[in-house]
Image (cartoon, rainbow, N blue to C red):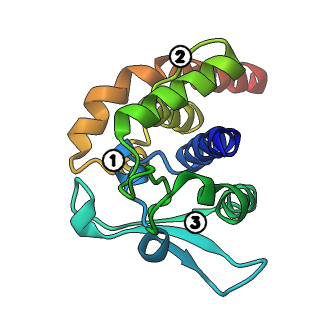
Amino acid sequence: KREDAQAANRIATAVWIKIAQRAPLRISNLLCIDIDQHILRSHAGKGAAVKLFIPATEVKNSKPLEVPLPAATVQLLEHYLDRHRKHLVDHPNSWLFPARDGKRKNPNVMAKAIEKLMREYLGFAINPHSFRHVAAKLFLSAHPGNYVDVQHLLGHKKLETTIKYYCDLEAEEVFKHFDAILLKLEQAN
């Protein structure tokens, strides 16, 4: 049973990482996912479209979140729910990431598990909040200056917050885009 719980915890951590890659939510929102309330399916069974829904009352900026999950994420989520989650609970509950006592998993415990798994696979640790920074960096690299979309992606209440923390991340990409403009102008002459 101990080995099953260890494997289940690793799979739970992988599910958290997979969801955080697609939905860079705050760790508290991800750890508060209730399977019955926050995971919406278009229909029962295989092939269902699945979304995470976090109501406005549970989000820092007071705006509801509705995040569609890609098929690969849904596949890992279903595998975890069908085969592994049961090894993590002694008491019935509907937390996606449960602790043995029936409560939700402690953020510090989950953070350590995430950092450990990332260190194992990447050679260095990444803390849970870094997924949000990586998402902003990747988005702004592809779309320099598009702070409004990053604001929505990260759930910032104010655009100023997004600009304050992420404006400097895109400087290199802005120069690349500017260089591309110059190259087009040179080729036109």
Q: Is residue 32 left or right of residue 80?
A: left
Amino acid type shown at disc 1: Ser
Q: CA distance from mark 2 to mark 3?
A: 31 Å
The disc labelled 2 sits on which kind of residue? Answer: Glu
Return the residue at label 3: 68
- As drawn, 7 above or below 53: above
Identify which residue is drawn at 47% across, 45% down. 24
| Sequence-earlier tag: 2 or 3 | 3
Quarter of the image that includes the C terminus: top right
Q: Secondary structure at mark 2?
A: helix
Mark 2 vs 1, N-terminal side: 1
Closer to us: 121 or 176: 121
User: Left of 50 or right of it: where is 31?
Assistant: left
Q: Circle 1 is placed at which residue position?
A: 28
- Under circle 3, the secondary element is strand
Gap between marks 2 and 1, in whole Å?
Answer: 32 Å
Q: Which residue is at the front of the view, 81 or 15?
A: 81
Amino acid type of the residue tagged 3 in the rendering: Pro
Q: Position of residue 81 (x, y in %)?
A: 64, 63
Look at 62% across and 84% down and name the residue there.
42
Q: Quadrant of residue 43?
A: bottom right
Where does the image place residue 168, in percent across and percent down from the top left?
38, 20
